Amino acid sequence: MNDESQDFCPHCESILPLPVNTDILKCRNCTYQINLLNYSKKSVKYILNINDVNNLKYMKNKSEEHFGPLVDRVCPKCGSKKMSYTTQQTRSIDEGQTIFYICPKCKYQESEYS
């Protein structure tokens, strides 16, 4: 490996710290060090992939729409044996979260405080 592309120490694999008031980058875990001039042309590239909403499966077929994972729970309105759920903290932090269930067939909704 070329030292110019290192974000980790090539000897002990520790993360190399940011240099402070020095021209030498030193590993905190071992004796490895490198002159910062070797980093003068280093760049970092980030790639952020965002899902295309038009390609999501649940958006294409509204008849099978659900808003979370499916669980074994009987819908009281239509009798479907599966319901989807989401959770949210709706009360104070020392109390349990609220579970929101929705039937993928009839869209009946109910909530449960845990």
Image: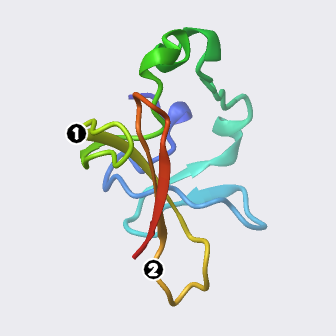
Say if 20 sits above or below 42 in the image. below
**Disc 1 element:** loop
| Up/down of 114 relative to 40, above or below | below
Q: Amino acid at mark 2?
A: Gly
Pinpoint residue 103: horizontal percent, then vertical percent: 41, 38
Image coordinates of residue 41 in percent, x first then y, are 72, 28
| 79 sits left or right of 33 in the view | left
Compared to 74, does 100 lie above or below? Answer: below
Residue underneath mark 2: 96
Q: Answer with left or right where residue 81 lies relative to residue 102.
A: left
What's the image's color scheme?
rainbow
> Where on the picture, by quarter, is residue 91?
bottom right
Residue 21 lies in quadrant: bottom right
Q: Of all residues shown, which one is farthest toward the front?
A: 77
Query: Of the residues under marks 1 and 2, which one precedes in the sequence?
Result: 1
Amino acid type, residue under disc 1 in the picture = Lys
Please tell me the numbered disc located at residue 106: none
Q: Nearer the viewer, residue 57 or 50?
A: 57
Outermost residue on the bottom side: it is 94
> Which residue is drawn at the image coordinates 66% and 27% (left, top)?
45
Under tag 2, what secondary structure?
loop
x 48%, y 19%: residue: 58
**Which residue is rendered at x = 60% and y = 56% of the image?**
25
Q: For the N terminus, which image quadrant? A: top left
Q: Which residue is mark 1?
A: 81
Residue 66: percent from left, percent from top? 45, 32
Q: Residue furthest right?
A: 21
Residues 89 and 80: in front is 80
| Residue 32 place in picture, x, y as percent | 43, 57
Task: Quadrant for the C terminus, please.
Answer: bottom left
Q: Nearer the viewer, mark 1 or mark 2?
A: 1
Residue at horizontal 45 percent and vertical 31 percent from the top? 106
